[in-house]
Amino acid sequence: MSLLPVLTSWYAYPFEELYGWLDDNVGTEVAYVVAAVIGAVGILTFVGLGALANVWLERKIIGRMQVRRGPNRVGPGGLLQPVADAIKLIQKEVLQPRAADGGLFNLPPIIVFIPAMLTFAVFAWAPDMVYADLDVGVLYLLALSSITSLAIFIAGWSSNNKYALLGAMRVIAMAIAYEIPLVLSLLAPVLLVGSMNIPEIINWQREHHTWIAFILPLPMLIYAFAATAELNRTPADIAEAESEIVAGFHTEYSGMKFGLFYAVELVNALAVSGIMASLFFGGYSLFGLDRWVPPWAILIGKIYIFYFGLIWLRGTLPRLRIDQLMGFAWKMLIPMALINIAVVAIQVLLWRELELTNWVLVPYAIINLVLAVVLIRQFYRMLTAGFYRLPTRVRLVPEVSVPSLPAPGSATQP
């Protein structure tokens, strides 16, 4: 049995002729291995170069936002600063506390990188550029997101440091709180399309000439907020609140072990941006423009647009308190996500059972937009009701009686 049809669904472009020649002259097994190696090298190259470039981008963009220059000494425009930082981290001494659990202490920097890398396997970079075309691609992504929490908890517990353990526990509490609205928000496009396969979700948006974000704005916003907290980035970096718990779960990690924790944060930011672009904004498609522009370039462009939004949040918003962050998830995001799922389920049921035309998506989009505005307004007012300290209405006083002060020198001597 030839494996060429399988290879065609694996990022065949622009290697169709190579796969065909290997399949005819060498063997299907060799063609299969070559296809896997090419895809893995491509993903690793993008992730590796992206991690280095993102260090420079974040420091430069945040520097501009905060009226600073950012790195500008090493290389033209500071381009080689990430390389210099990597060399510095590699040369630093890697320390390990005597009381730490040696076996478990060394695992988290490795484990935490695995889900970040595997996430890119199910992304559709083009119609024929998918490394792992899974029917349960969305479920696969959700399963990978849980592995990071385990690695963080192992890092905090194995350090045998109360600050590291406290930071790890705070991350786990936040991850549990925000994993619920994150899952519910991704369930909405799955219900609408009727598939968990990421290429099929992208093709659905191409066929209907729209983005799911236009039809389902509320789950898109819920996912954006929940994913930002899952990334442990500002304004949700409560595990690294230096004024409270030193540096969180990686307090005891130094050298390149710390560098891996820092790098995986940048890689996860790219992964979240890729999920947002694929499930809510059409992936590699752009209303026909992908016929002339390489689809993978369109997807990368969308990824970095959303990544710029994450940088913008990091450079402008202050860190939230843990009670504010947890209350935002349990009191606002989760109830809104549950209401949204019920509404989307009813809409899809009516659409399928009554066999309505695709024009029903227009009123659905209007209804969902109004619902999003109303729910956000109401839940925000409920959540922030106890934060207001000023009167809600100005009270006018016609006359103010002020006692007169005694004239200078008129005070009687005792």
Image (cartoon, rainbow, N blue to C red):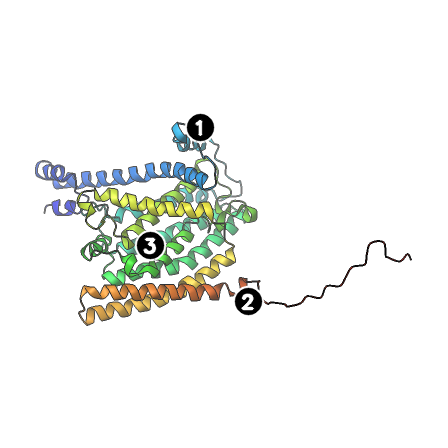
Q: Are marks 1 and 3 in contact (CB under 8 Å)?
A: no
Disc assigned to residue 290: none
Q: Nearer the viewer, residue 375 or 239?
A: 375
Disc assigned to residue 73: 1
Three-letter amino acid code at disc 1? Arg
Q: Residue furthest left?
A: 24
The vertical placement of 51 against 74, above or below, is below
* SS category of the residue bearing label 2: loop
Q: CA distance from mark 1 to mark 3?
A: 42 Å
Q: Is residue 275 left or right of residue 263?
A: left
Q: Nearer the viewer, residue 264 or 186?
A: 186
Residue at 36% x, 66% y: name it. Answer: 338
The vertical placement of 42 against 317, above or below, is above
**Residue 7, picture quadrant:** top left
Q: Is residue 38 left or right of residue 58?
A: left
Number of numbered discs: 3
Residue at 39% x, 38% y: name it. Answer: 57
Label 1 CA crowd tier, 10 Å (few <14, some 14–19, many 20+): few
Q: Are marks 1 and 2 in contact (CB under 8 Å)?
A: no
Residue 128, percent from left and from top: 18, 46
| Nearer to us: label 1 or label 2 | 2
Three-letter amino acid code at disc 2? Arg
Q: CA distance from mark 1 to mark 2?
A: 54 Å
Disc assigned to residue 143: 3
Disc assigned to residue 393: 2
Residue 350, percent from left and from top: 23, 71
Q: Nearer the viewer, residue 187 or 112?
A: 187
Residue at 40% x, 55% y: name it. Answer: 225
Label 2 CA crowd tier, 10 Å (few <14, some 14–19, many 20+): few
Q: Is residue 320 left or right of residue 183?
A: right
